[in-house]
Image (tube, rainbow, N blue to C red):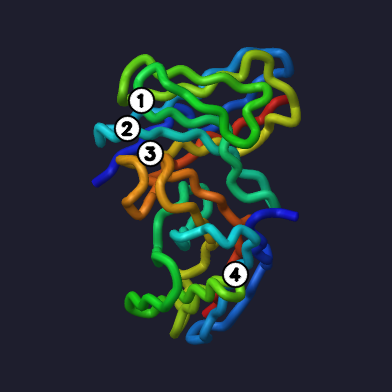
Amino acid sequence: QKEVEQDPGPLSVPEGAIVSLNCTYSNSAFQYFMWYRQYSRKGPELLMYTYSSGNKEDGRFTAQVDKSSKYISLFIRDSQPSDSATYLCAMRLSGGYNKLIFGAGTRLAVHP
Amino acid sequence: DVKVTQSSRYLVKRTGEKVFLECVQDMDHENMFWYRQDPGLGLRLIYFSYDVKMKEKGDIPEGYSVSREKKERFSLILESASTNQTSMYLCAITGGRGGSTGELFFGEGSRLTVL
């Protein structure tokens, strides 16, 4: 069993839809949770991060962490074609050398 | 802006060739990483380095070695390339040890095809 599970998709939605992307994990010691966005033929870039449990909002994006269920989510409101990318969840323990464990990534396509 | 530069974006090599992938950063960060990215498997850590001449194995180091002679440069070496090393290779950097967000800054990737 992988430490971090993420449905690879692809996920196709119409412009304006609410998108929900999810990851589950097995290591209850993870403390930092992140979402990276990767456009085609580019390296990933950090979109959101959350420390421990709770919600974090940034514009159209909301990240949620439920440590009791070992489940994290990224919501995208009013999705745009420019949101079409692969979204990778990542997480790590507290301390150490910032060794992140990544999910496989979910490919999202937002069509006009 | 953070700049992580991978010198080769696309490479085609033959089985058994020695391959060098170079990564250069301009942020004076201590930690540098090499990942490979494969469909359905996500990013897997090959090696990382937390200082000049220091290195640690990641999750899949077999078939790879690394070199860090200068702080800004981290090289990934495939001593004898094999077809199962066909992949996207991503270099990343981050500063400091723990206590920070652990944000990784990535290069644009080097897509290697081994024939």
Label 2: state its secondary structure.
Answer: loop
Q: CA distance from mark 3 to mark 2?
A: 8 Å
Question: In the image, which disc is placed on residue A70?
Answer: 4
Chain identifier of the residue bearing label 4 in the image: A
In front of the other: A112 or B29? B29
Q: Which residue is mark 3?
A: B93
Question: In the image, are marks 4 and 2 on the same chain?
Answer: no
Dot 2 amino acid type:
Glu
Label 3: state its secondary structure.
Answer: strand
Name which residue lies at 51% across and 20% down.
B66
Task: State which tag comes first along the sequence, 3 or 2.
Answer: 2
Look at discs 3 and 1 and give the one toward the viewer: 1
Question: In the image, are marks 4 and 3 on the same chain?
Answer: no
Label 1: state its secondary structure.
Answer: strand
Q: Which residue is mark 2?
A: B30
Chain identifier of the residue bearing label 2 in the image: B
Left or right placement of residue A99 versus residue B1 in this view: right
In front of the other: B103 or B22? B103
